[in-house]
Amino acid sequence: MNAIPANTLIFAVVLIVAVGAIVAWVVMQRQRTQRLQQRFGPEYTRTVDEFGGRTRAEAELTRREQRVARLNITPLAPADAARFSQAWNALQSRFIDNPKGVVGQADHLVRELMVKRGYPMGDFERRAADISVDHPGVVTTYRAAQAIAVREDRGEADTEELRQAVVHYRTLFDELLEVKPTSTAHTSAGPTPVHS
């Protein structure tokens, strides 16, 4: 019988290990992609488009996750939630008389709520990126509200667009209005109801 040369055997083992490592890497990348797609939803696709490819987009989304993990995001105390709900209801009641002013006030109230929860106040894109980590379902509406607010600043938004911006801000507002339970007697009641 012919013996297999030692060099050939070593080469075969190295080749098997290399193929195994490549397969493991590909599987891990697919799992990462699936996890990010599930976590970020439509924001994943938007980020891929913005960054021009999956690899750069996934690196950005991972950086967002890491950045937000370092933040101290906390739910609201019931008293704070009630105060914010009352402020929103008052803001909403002023829409008919001052739709342009209400859009700016809605943006301001959402920012105030974000600060109270622990989100840093950078530029809009940073705020939207931070929101996308824990609230990916509403970041698209936040971007839409901001786009209308910018159009309104230029005098280009009509009343229906302003109404839509307030609805978009309200969607984010409701999502951010998480309440910290104070006792078992109050936990079933939840936050103060807020209606559009």
Image (cartoon, rainbow, N blue to C red):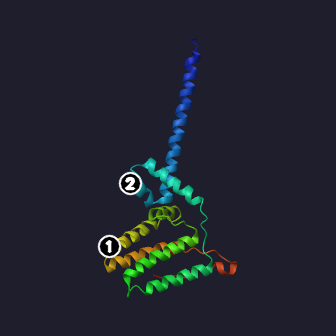
Q: What residue type is labelled 1?
A: Arg
Q: Is mark 2 in CB contact (under 8 Å) with mark 1?
A: no
In the structure shown, which secondary structural element does the residue marked by tag 1 occupy?
loop
Q: Return the x and y of residue 162 as percentages of the image width and height.
A: 36, 78
Q: Quadrant of the C terminus?
A: bottom left
Q: Quadrant of the N terminus?
A: top right
Tell me the distance, in whole angstroms, between the alpha carbons under discs 2 and 1.
Answer: 27 Å
Q: Return the x and y of residue 60 as percentages of the image width and height.
A: 48, 53
Q: What residue type is labelled 2?
A: Asp
Answer with mark 2 or mark 1, whichever residue precedes in sequence. Answer: 2
Q: Is residue 61 above or below residue 142?
A: above
Other-residue count near label 1 (Cα within 10 Å), few / some / many at <14 / 14–19 / ≥20? few
130 or 40: which is nearer to us?
Answer: 130
Q: Residue furthest top?
A: 1
Q: Return the x and y of residue 40 as percentages of the image width and height.
A: 48, 59
In the structure shown, which secondary structural element does the residue marked by tag 2 occupy?
helix
Name the residue that disc number 1 marks.
154
The residue at 45%/62% (across/down) is 125
The residue at 52%/61% (across/down) is 133
Q: Can residue 133 be seen in this view?
A: yes
The residue at 54%/80% (across/down) is 84
The residue at 47%/55% (across/down) is 37
Which label belongs to residue 49? Answer: 2
120 or 76: which is nearer to us?
Answer: 120
Q: Is residue 80 above or below residue 27?
A: below
Q: Quadrant of residue 167?
A: bottom left
Q: Is residue 140 left or right of residue 78?
A: left
Count of marks placed on residues? 2
Q: Quadrant of residue 17?
A: top right
Other-residue count near label 2 (Cα within 10 Å), few / some / many at <14 / 14–19 / ≥20? few
